[in-house]
Image: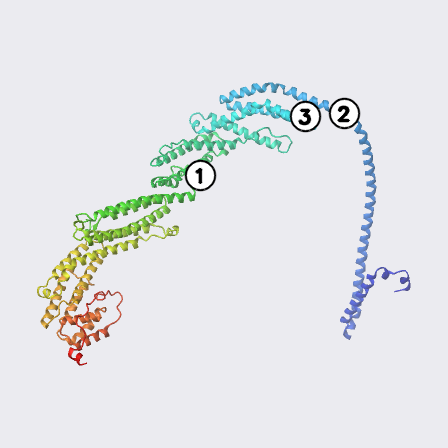
Amino acid sequence: MSAGDQKSGGPEAVWPEVERAERLARGAALKWASGVFCRPEQLERLSQYRKRESQRTSSIHTRLKSMIQSYLEGVGWGLEQLREARLELREVSHAVRKAGLESSGNAEGGRALERLREVSVSHRQLLATVSNLPRLYAVRSMVLETERLVESRRLLEAHARLVELESWQDDILWQLHGAAGAAGSELSAEDQELVDGYFSGVGQLVDALGKELWAVVSSALALAQQNPTPFVSAVRIVEREEALDRALLEERGGTRRPLPPGRPRCWRASFFQVLEEAVSARFRSVSYLHTRGPGLAGHLAALQHGVMADLNTVRHLLEHCVPPHYGLTGAYLRAGHRCLHAHLAQVSSWDLESGETFAVLHWVLHTYNSPDMMGDPELVTEMEKVELGPLISTEGLEQLHSKYVQSVGKSVSEWMHKALQVELQDWHRDQEPDTDHEGFYQTSLPTIITQMLEENARVARMIGESLRDQTIQMGLYEMETLLNRFREALVDFGKEHRGNPNNVNNKFYLHYLLASISNCIILKKSTESLQKQQSARSAARFSRTPPNPLAALDRAVRRACRLAMDQFLQDLQPFLSGLLTRAWLVQGDPAPKLCHVLERHLELHGRVRPPCRQRLQEEARWLTAVEYVRALMKKRLVCRSAEERRQLGQQMVQDDQRFREVLHGPDGSVPEENPLSLLPVLADFLRLKDPFMLSLEVSALAARYPDIGEEHVSVLLDIRGDVSRDVRGAVLDSLERSAGPLPAGYRPIFTGILVPPSAMAFCLPAAKCGTA
């Protein structure tokens, strides 16, 4: 830095940032140069770097000079604009001062015109009064004349006079309002009250004309077929009023002028409201006499006739009397639908019987939408436009469904109870049960129940699948309840018979038991048919536990079969005591009597419908075999010789032959599963001549009848009377070796046969006992 710069406070003294910037620049340059020229061979390019940096510095200086020059020009232009604005501001302030002086001079002259303004306002008021005097004098007469026109139902003329009167009233109010505004005040309450009082008859005329209009509209359906002219006049007046409302709203929407009193009237909306009330009144006019009970169906039919008659009147007559945008048919449909919705909701709240509920449901779901009503092809397009909702809500339909099902369920329960009582009385008749065309026993119970449930399902199907499913579900619940009672009645019937088997009223006890089994089979088929009619998703719609009548049927059938078998055993008992005794060995009795009992029961079992017929016959054969073997196990007969063993075996084979003759089927064959085939096997065991062959025989016996026990074989050996202790031990050992688990499907025959204890006591001889 030079001495002159230091003395004069050079740029560095004034701008210390410049010195700092220069130092930073020099440091950056040295750093760059040390990086570029770090090797000697790079000094050869020094001249090129110097030339390039000189050019860059010159370019930067040029841009700086250009920028500073443009800034200086802008500052000069701004100073020039400020100079011109100051001159203009000076002129404006001078003009404002001059205008203020002139305004203060004119204020004195304005005070002199106040009196003239008051005279002008008074003149305008007098002019308005004079111009309105003819109208004011004519108001009374116009009101009276309009009243006469309204009373004579000359509605168009009356409306024209009314519109004129309202126009006068509006003009007078506006003139008074304008005069008050010119005077700088609002219209006084006294003036308003004066005008309202003078034109009070106009408001009464509006009410009277509206009353007549709505009377015409409400009776339009009746007038349409006689003289629709009053209705047309009413519609024209409504449209005029709508046009006046619209014009006044458009004209005065953005002005201070108020709407005339009572505007807008919105008579078109009132027109449709009155129409809806008229439709509701038409529905109420349908006779409500005998609506409850059987008369409800007639009432709904009258509703259908009335609705369609009125709808035809609207479509073919009234629709041509109104502008197209009215959509009068759609308006009637909406109004009628709402009225029907309210009326049917009221009807649904009554305590309806099943027939009444069915009538309502069928009318709502089918008749209303049928081609005879709203499903008419000519109405389909109109129905799509109005988009009517359901005639009864979903909740209302569910309540009606529930009410119908409960009512039908109550009736079904009563009928089932009566049918069961008739069935119980038939059980004590002194004659056999009736038979069907196939010869099977039956009573009237299954026919009554089946027809009743099928008919209820068919009737409910006429309403819809949901109601059918609910009705079937209810019927299955009631059938399950009936079958439980039926089973209890069978138990009581059996107890009564066991308590007094010789009672004359129980003469056909077994026959009615078998008829009950056939009845249950018929009811099973009916139940399965009803269950198949239900839709797949019906079970998910019911919160209760699903009914299980098939299980109740199975319990009832098993109980009836058990009672039938008990009776079979009871008939066998008198002859079982003489079986396998010495008398039987000599004479053969009582085997023929047993065969007779078996034959009689098998014949009766043939009157039962399959598959219970086969089940009963199989059970009878089984019980016969079990009782025969049980009689054998009682050791009533012990053989004393080989001849007696031969006779015993021969007699058992003869008994088996007698049973086979009884068991012959229609084709002469014996059933494959015949438990009585055990008899010849036991006969061969008892009459075997060589006792040492008994081990092989008992092995074969155990293989065929694996439930035979040691005690049963011991009894057989005792009956033979010729088996030594060694042979007995060998036979029992062979039996033990042959013992194994029972095969699948095998029905034990020996398991339920108890062997009486041996009468022989085990003890050493007396002498040896004494010696010991």
Q: Which mark is residue 132?
A: none
Q: Which residue is mark 2?
A: 113
Query: Does dot 1 land on a helix, a strand or a loop?
Result: helix
Amino acid type indicated by mark 1: Met
Q: Residues within 10 Å of mark 2 (few under 14, many from 20)?
A: few
Q: Which residue is mark 3?
A: 179
Locate the C terminus and report the quarter of the image it occupies.
bottom left
Q: Is residue 113 above or below residue 574?
A: above
Residue drawn at (69%, 27%) of the image: 182
Can you see residue 164?
no
Amino acid type indicated by mark 3: Ala
Distance (Cα) linking label 3 and label 2 = 18 Å
Locate the N terminus and report the quarter of the image it occupies.
bottom right
From the viewer's perspective, tell me whether residue 229 is left or right of residue 124: left
Asked whether the beta carbons under mark 1 and mark 2 sit within 8 Å of each other, the answer is no
Counting from the top left corner in percent of width and height, residue 341 is at: 43, 38
Counting from the top left corner in percent of width and height, residue 758 is at: 18, 70
From the viewer's perspective, tell me whether residue 734 is left or right of residue 301: left
Counting from the top left corner in percent of width and height, residue 262 is at: 57, 29
Mark 3 or mark 2: name the one nearer the start of the chain: 2
Residue drawn at (77%, 69%) of the image: 31
Counting from the top left corner in percent of width and height, residue 565 is at: 20, 57
Q: Which quadrant would residue 718 be assigned to in this image?
A: bottom left
Q: Which residue is mark 1?
A: 383
